[in-house]
Image (cartoon, rainbow, N blue to C red):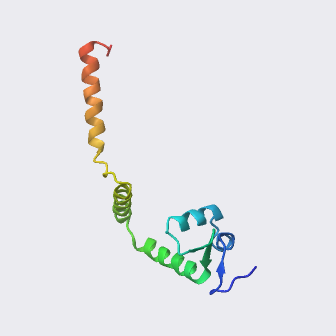
Amino acid sequence: MTATPEQRVGAEVIANFTGIPSSTIIKLAQQRRIPATKIGRRWRFSVSRVDQWIKEREEANLCRSPHQESVIKSQRIASNAVKRGGLKSSFQASDTDAAYAQMMRGKQRSGLNN
């Protein structure tokens, strides 16, 4: 089936259009990360809106540095934690080093480090 830009199509057509598995397309729709409308029990997509969404993503990805990506990822993690009612983890790499050093001191005191 060939879809016109204004036509609403199912996840299978968008999967063929984008090369992304239809299960992933549905997950993106459920997470509201891709433009979609749920009609009854099925997700429907506008080919033109999905195409525009892809172009916007491409432009955004071309303009980002690796540092910006890590900042965005941190913001997304914090945002998801707040949505779930929790707090963003304050765990740092230095915490691991401190825990390891404390463990080694304990082994040395008890004579386990031979």
Quarter location, residue 7? bottom right
Residue 25 lies, in percent from the top left, at: 60, 66
Task: Give me the residue at 55% from left, 81% from top.
Answer: 49
Task: Give me the residue at 39% from left, 58% from top.
Answer: 80
Quarter location, residue 73? bottom left
The residue most toward the front is 40
Q: In this view, does 59 lie above or below 103?
A: below
Q: In this view, does 99 lie above or below 94?
A: above
Quick one: 96 or 62, which is closer to the camera?
A: 96
Task: Give me the residue at 60% from left, 65% from top.
Answer: 26
Total label count? 0
Q: Is residue 110 above or below residue 22?
A: above
Q: In this view, does 78 lie to the left or right of 3?
A: left
Residue 23 lies, in percent from the top left, at: 63, 61
Task: Give me the residue at 46% from left, 77% from top.
Answer: 59
Q: In which quarter of the image is the C terminus?
A: top left
Residue 84 lies, in percent from the top left, at: 38, 54
Q: Is residue 61 above or below residue 104?
A: below
Q: In which quarter of the image is the N terminus?
A: bottom right
Residue 24 lies, in percent from the top left, at: 59, 62
Quick one: 51 or 36, which is closer to the camera?
A: 36
The residue most toward the right is 1
